[in-house]
Amino acid sequence: MPDPFVAIGGDAAGLSAASKCKREDPDRDVIVFERGNWVSYAHCGTPYFVKGEVEHLTDLLSLSPDEAEERGIDLRRRHEVTAIDTGEQVVSVEGPDGRFDQPYGDLLIGTGAHAITGPIPGTDLEGVFSLHGLPDAAAIRAMLADPDSFTAADLGGDPYLDEERVARFGDMAPPETVAIVGGGYVGVEMAEAFDAHDVDVRVFQRDVDLIPAFGDAVADEVADALRENGVEVHLDTVVEALESEDGRVSGLTCRDGTTLDLDAVLVGIGIAPNVELVENTPIELGDSGAIRIDDYGRTSVENVYAAGDCAEMEHVVTGESDWVPLGLTANRAGRAIGATVAGDPTDVGGIAGTAMLKAFEMECGRSGIVDHERAREAGFDPISKTITAGSRSGYYPGAKETVVTLTADRETGRLIGGTIAGEDRAAVRIDTVATALEADLTVDEVERLDLGYAPPFSPVWDPVLVGAKVLAGEL
Amino acid sequence: MPDPFVAIGGDAAGLSAASKCKREDPDRDVIVFERGNWVSYAHCGTPYFVKGEVEHLTDLLSLSPDEAEERGIDLRRRHEVTAIDTGEQVVSVEGPDGRFDQPYGDLLIGTGAHAITGPIPGTDLEGVFSLHGLPDAAAIRAMLADPDSFTAADLGGDPYLDEERVARFGDMAPPETVAIVGGGYVGVEMAEAFDAHDVDVRVFQRDVDLIPAFGDAVADEVADALRENGVEVHLDTVVEALESEDGRVSGLTCRDGTTLDLDAVLVGIGIAPNVELVENTPIELGDSGAIRIDDYGRTSVENVYAAGDCAEMEHVVTGESDWVPLGLTANRAGRAIGATVAGDPTDVGGIAGTAMLKAFEMECGRSGIVDHERAREAGFDPISKTITAGSRSGYYPGAKETVVTLTADRETGRLIGGTIAGEDRAAVRIDTVATALEADLTVDEVERLDLGYAPPFSPVWDPVLVGAKVLAGEL
């Protein structure tokens, strides 16, 4: 009997791996250490919980602790791994009953990522928060509720709540004005969430574009969508300081002199991988600062794997190791590693950086390499074209303008990236681009794809085909 | 100056070719002969015109005769080509001003297809019709209108209407009960169209499934959608005869003894390519009975091309010549041929037989080889799995069950076909399958595709990925 398979982190990567390993090799001991209260929850769903479209925190659980136990997984919540000894194959753990060492046969590091708050003075004030995980989501929705009628039970998920924090946020008067510092995923999705609570929302973005990963054509559509819904968007604007009154945040000053009176600030300027645990080990990090892994999720140290938001993955377009923390990647890589440690070596797959985003009614998608500077770094000679095409046959009611940008390598004609935005089935069309990228198709080949056509869903020339047709004409 | 480029047929293939040729080589004479009144219209939109969602016939025109003229195309409507002399490179034409010969340098046969009515006695009765083209659509909508208030102007497109036919149908009392003979595209779409006019609709399908090209899993979803909307569906039922009263159709008898009193019958049992013109020429037909062409749309005779519903195309999965008449194929092949005859040889592309269908709220898609018998004929050892997955994260409002069937070749693991049905963004997801088919991906590769994920649009594992995961488990 080998030593157990141990996973650090009870979210997508850790529990996918644990479940798969236990299913393939039921006799193997599988232990998951999770330092928090929650396991296996949908990060991406938290803005919709804050918005109120998702009623209870527990709705966001993919797998409850009880279900994990039913699968035979030895799940230890509130257990923090504090050190890894890769020589002895042992991890040090601090749990509610003290500290102990746990030997492992195989180890998965699935420690995820954390929100960064950056160098803005005042981010430790009351009324300033990030959104990264269910505890944050619970606190923010508590704050948005009427303090006179709010009870923690409204949030669902009582057994897992940080009651003290929820009570503290629940006691606050709901904000009238919220500033969101950062216009990435969290910023855009939370603008919609706050707006649903009739809060006056201002987004401050340091970059000239919102969600820069989606390119400027999509960024413009998203900014328009926010503004049409009453959200004030400040681009190319650096927030320099937060001010307070009676200990609670009360104002904000930007480098350009803009000031704003406000009641709450959400800081959503990015995330960074949780890699403190590997700092004093021989486990190597990649250039991004996340853990470098091979095709099977193995780190540079034998029997140690990594997956999810703390790990790099091979990018299918560049062939290089890259850090693009997204939900499917964590789930898929975890599952593959679970199979591998159970004796069935399984490729974790590559990433194309495919992502989707909702901004009110606007649906967006992106995949591959969109940024020209990044493309040149990877050895490509990038060229992009942006087109606007209908989402349905023009005569069919409900057709919406859909903006597609495709990017190719001028020398080979290969498609290397694409983005899309539109209000009618736009986001899922990015999957055509993602599939083409993984298959190394040229723009000519994409132009000749036999995609579907039916007046209510797609025009004769799908917007992606129109994009390919126009870009091919430039090559 | 070479002889003109002549296109027979002024619909998708002919006018795409003419437009492209004229754009690339403005000095070339380009003549299009169209035997009917209408050119370049959206066949696939006709059910929605009958339904009333599309108001005017002219809304369905992609290119009006005036626009064609503006592009420098010599468009001759009501001109029927009656013979092709490939030796002399001349076509015989009958127009309003008599008969004449037209020499060609290059010739495109884009004659389209026609609806077949099959061997059912009584299909020539008043009140029995097909839907293939705008004149049929005009007649059917005229029939559905209240005779006391109907005027032909309601239909739009006065200059092109067959006034006598429209007047005759407009005088009929709107039907209370319509039988649709045939449960393919036309049958399913027209069931929805008639239902919108509060007509009692019965569909009679000879096969055990509706739309057999979409496979049985989709067929079941479509039958359910029709029935839930009050349409009576008779499967595995052969209509044997139509009865009449006072010259108008009044009843129907099936082989199993079922009888029905009715006021109108739509026959939609399929289409056949219009190839009469090539029967006495050396131009070769393929096994399907449609015209065989090569990668550049060339027939077996020099300087003669064919495209659209009258021509075969190379299937990307089988590599064989196949007849799958669909709109995008005609447009793309026409455009490629226009470029080729203008001096820029352009591949017409292959087909995957990708198609979409709407049945009330149900969205369906199919691509590739779905039928096992057809797969075996093409040399594959087919295996299929059907799964049901959510269209969004389960906790996000509006998630709908989506049914995916994927088919692979057991020996190579290659994906060879797929179908999908669901009420939330299901149809466009078939484009992932279409792209994978054209790239010859294996099911393992499809399982590892980095598709998009966002709670409002797609779950972590897109339904197509779930299908691939399950099918890969069987290989």
Image (cartoon, coloured by chain):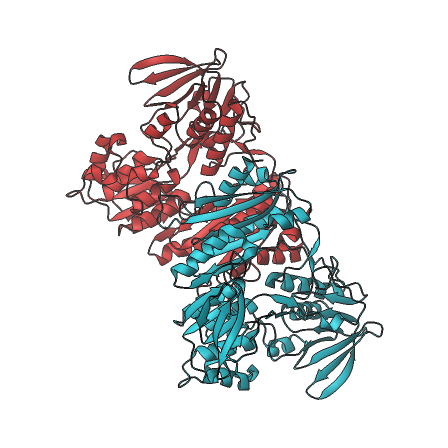
Chain colours: A red, B cyan
Using the image, determine if residue B153 lies above or below residue A341: below
Q: Nearer the viewer, residue B258 or A150?
A: B258
**Residue lying at the far left of the rendered structure:** A148
Residue lying at the far bottom of the rendered structure: B97
Residue B361 x/y as whole percent: 42, 59
Instruction: For residue A386, say whether it is visible.
Output: no
Task: Tell me if residue A45 can be seen.
Answer: yes
Residue A197: image x %, image y %? 26, 50
Q: Quarter of the image containing the C terminus of chain A?
A: bottom right
x, y percentage for residue A389? 53, 61
Instruction: In the displayed orientation, state which residue is furthest to the top.
Output: A88
Percent position of residue A168, x then y: 21, 35
State the residue in front, B265 or A146: B265
Furthest residue toward right? B87
Q: Nearer the viewer, residue B230 or A398?
A: B230
Compared to residue B132, the image places residue B183 above or below, namely above
- Residue at 38 percent across and 71 percent down: it is B198
Above or below: residue A96 compared with residue A320: above
Q: How many marks?
A: 0
Instruction: Indicate whether B431 appears above or below A45.
Output: below
Return the residue nearer the eye: A349 or B429. Answer: B429
